[in-house]
Amino acid sequence: MGKSGFLRLSGGGSHEHLVMPAKVYSNNVLSSRFRMIKVKPLSDLRVPEPPQFFMVWVPGVDEIPLSVADYDGEVLSFIYEVKGAGTGALSRLGPGSYVGLKGPLGRPLNVVEGSSALLVVGGSGVAPTPYITKYLASRGCRFEVVWGVKKRGELFNLGSVMSGVEYIHVATEDCSIGYCGLASELARELVGRYRYDLIIGVGPKGMLKSLCEVTSGVNTYVVLEAMVKCGVGLCGSCALPNTDKLLCVDGPAFKCGEVMHYLRT
C-alpha cells in the first residue's frame, strides 16, 4: 500500500497504475435494467474524457470495467447493469462503502467544435451516454440522441442525467413507445433526412455493425465492449479478433473502418 491509501500495481516496464480508494455516495435503481452508482474518490483524480472507463474493484469479489457516466470534479457516476458476481456485489453496496478505482483508461474522443452529431445508443451503451453528451455540449456541438431498448420498462429519464441534448428519439423493439424497431433502423431514417458531421454509436455489437453499414460515407465512430481484465494492454483479453486493436488502449471508440472486420465476425 502506497501513500494516501493507494495500492500500487505494476505490470512490468513503465506500465504502473494506482488503485485509488473511493467512497460510495449513492447507489440507486434507474429502471428495470439499469442502476447508477456515485462514488467520491479520496484523492485527486485525473479528469476522465469520454468514453474513457475505470476498472472498479469491488473488495473481495472482482474488478470490473465501467464507463464514466459523469464526473463533476468531485463525484464519479457509473451506470451499470447487474449481469454477474461483480456487478451483483456492486449493486449491494450502500453509502459509506468503499471501492477501488484504476483509471481513467482508454483513449478519449476528439470532436471538432461546433459539429452536428447523432448519438445512437442501444442496450448497455446508455452507460457512457451522459458524459459523451456533456462533452459534446462543452464543444458547442448540436446533437440529437437515438435511444433504443427492447421494451418500455428499460427506459428512464435520460434527459435528467444529460446536458445540451436537443432531442431524444426513442425506439422500442416491442413497439410499446416511440419508433417501432431498432435504433440502427431509426438512425438510417434520420441520416437520410438530415446532415450530420459525426455519428457516434454505443451499444451491442450487432447494432454497431448495422449502424456502420447504414451510415457509410458519414464520419462514424463506434464505442465497443469487450472482456477487459487488466485495462492497460498487458493481458490481451480485450484484443479485437480480425484487427490489430486492443480495446483498452486503442479504444474504446473506433472508426468503423478500423473494426468492421471484427464487427462482421
Image (spheres, rainbow, N blue to C red):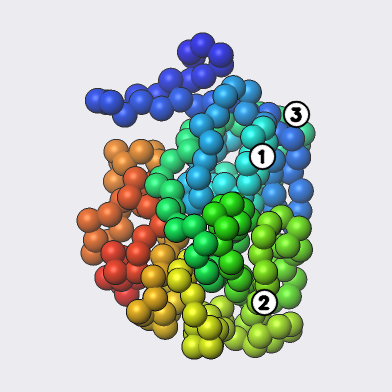
The residue lying toward the viewer, choosing from 129 and 140, is: 140
Q: Does residue 59 appear to the left or right of 154 in the view shown?
A: left
Mark number displayed over residue 10 = none
The residue lying toward the viewer, choosing from 188 and 29, is: 188
Residue drawn at 49 percent across, 14 percent down? 1
Within 10 angstroms of label 2, few (less than 14), some, or many (20 or more) residues? many
CA gap between label 3 and label 2 equals 36 Å
CA gap between label 2 and label 1 equals 27 Å
Residue drawn at 36 percent across, 26 percent down? 16
In the displayed structure, 5 sits above or below 228; it is: above
Query: x, y (%) of residue 197?
Result: 45, 71
Which label sits in the foreground, 3 or 2? 2
The residue that disc 2 covers is 170
The image quadrant that residue 240 belongs to is bottom left
Q: What residue type is labelled 2?
A: Val
In the displayed structure, 203 sits above or below 213; it is: above
Q: What residue type is labelled 1?
A: Asp
Mark number displayed over residue 72 = 1
First in sequence, mark 3 or 1: give its number. 1
First in sequence, mark 2 or 1: give its number. 1
Asked whether disc 3 touches disc 1, contact meaning CB atoms under 8 Å apart, the reply is no
Which label sits in the foreground, 2 or 1? 1
Query: x, y (%) of residue 51?
Result: 49, 51
The residue that disc 3 covers is 96
First in sequence, mark 3 or 2: give its number. 3
Q: What residue type is labelled 3?
A: Gly
In the displayed structure, 199 sits above or below 107; it is: below
Residue 132 visible, this orientation: no
